[in-house]
Amino acid sequence: MATLPVETIVTHISKFPGWKHVGNTSVTKNFSFSSFEKMGHFVYLVTQYTEKEEHYPQISITNFDVSISLSTASASGVTGKDLLVAQRINQIEYTVKSL
């Protein structure tokens, strides 16, 4: 899978609230939750989805906050798969926050 041109990444990522293109290597987003339970549920759902897709994000957790970074190691950058996963993670965030 080939990396996407920067212009394509910026255009698509602008449609996903909160996501940022970092350098030419990844897209990232910070998530904040109102409780540890919601944060944990979010991380659980993200890991279930990414395991099924075999596309593993870098996840950092601090208190009720989660930082997720996506890139495709085999392509050494951002691919279409990263953008699809970012979009789905935003949907998971919305679902968890609406509980």
Image: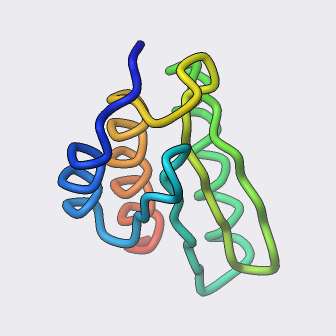
Measured from the top left, where is residue 40 in percent x and y?
A: 71, 61
Q: Residue at x 55, y 73 (%)?
A: 31
Say if 84 sits above or below 23 in the image: above
Q: Quadrant of residue 79?
A: top left
Q: Residue at x 29, y 37 (%)?
A: 5
Q: Is residue 77 toward the left or the right of residue 79 in the image?
A: right
Question: Residue most toward the right?
Answer: 62
Which colour scheme appears in the figure? rainbow
Residue nearest the viewer, comparing 39 with 62: 62
State the image quarter where residue 41 is shown. bottom right
Which corner quadrant holds the N terminus?
A: top left
Question: What is the residue that sits farthest to the top in this orientation?
Answer: 1
Quadrant holding the C terminus:
bottom left
Q: How far from the left and from the top, in percent, is residue 73?
A: 63, 25
Residue sitting at x 66%, y 47%:
44
Q: Position of residue 89 (x, y in %)?
A: 44, 50
The mark tally for this picture is 0
The correct choice, above or below, for 60 with respect to 76 in the image is below
* Residue 16 percent coordinates (x, y): 28, 60
Q: From what the image shows, is residue 71 above or below residue 23?
A: above
Residue ID at (33%, 29%): 80
Whether residue 36 is situated above or below residue 85 in the rendered picture: below
Relative horizontal placement of residue 94, taking residue 77 as reference (left or right): left
Nearest the viewer among 98 and 63 is 63
Closer to the camera in the image, 50 or 41? 50
